[in-house]
Image: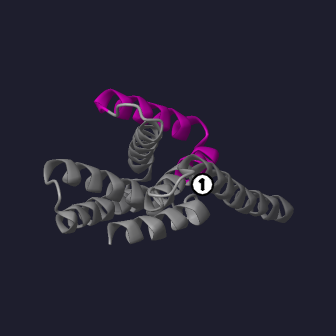
Amino acid sequence: MLGFINLILGGSLLIAGRKLFWLFVGAAGFITGIQFASRFWQGNEGLAIIVGLVAGIVFALLAIFLQGVAIGIAGFLSGAYVLSALAAMLGMNTNLIVYIIGGVIGVVLVSYLFDWAIITLSSLAGASLITEFFSQQRGGGLIFLILFIAGVVIQGSMLRSEKGITRQSD
């Protein structure tokens, strides 16, 4: 069940992570809730999904009503998740320090390059979620890279076309 949720959520983030900012922030909360619930209540997937859903809804509401705060939180959580997932794919130990470093990188990216940071982080998070779904198969790094590039290209094209339309109407 969780794998299927990751697949749907990952695909949504790859295609519309920047456009549906609240979804991106909610997904970051959902992923974080799942990770923490899985560590504290090992083996209970149903409880982990419920905790993830509650966290995701809270973060999505934050994105809608407190966008500035939500941007920082989403940047931190996404950066932390992505660096932890990349470290795990490379066989490295993932600990709190890796999580915090990834979070700080995510906040810095979101603060200075908002649109492209959201595109990059949502593409990384989407690619990570989908790659986890297919984790039993070899070539996970290649799948991750292809999905990441596809997400950046799709969302970047959407951003450029939006900006092109805006410039033409000015």
In the rendered image, residue 6, in percent from the top left (x then y), is placed at 42, 64
Which residue is farthest left? 41
Quadrant that contains the N terminus: bottom left
In the rendered image, residue 75, in percent from the top left (x then y), is placed at 45, 43
Which is more toward the observer, 48 or 61?
A: 48
Which is more toward the observer, 4 or 121?
A: 4
- Looking at the magenta stretch, what is its main secondary structure? helix
Which is more toward the observer, 117 or 13?
A: 13
In the rendered image, residue 140, in percent from the top left (x then y), is placed at 54, 51
- Asked if residue 125 lies in the magenta stretch, the reply is no
> In the rendered structure, which segment of residues is drawn in magenta?
95-122
Q: Residues within 10 Å of mark 1 (few under 14, many from 20)?
A: some
Which residue is farthest front? 138
- For the point 51% across and 32% down, the residue is 108
- For the point 64% across and 46% down, the residue is 116
Q: Which residue is mark 1?
A: 143
Label 1, secondary structure: give it. Answer: helix
Q: Is residue 100 left or right of residue 165?
A: left
> Hey, which quadrant is residue 57 in on the image?
bottom left
Residue type at mark 1: give it: Ile
Q: Is residue 7 left or right of residue 18?
A: left
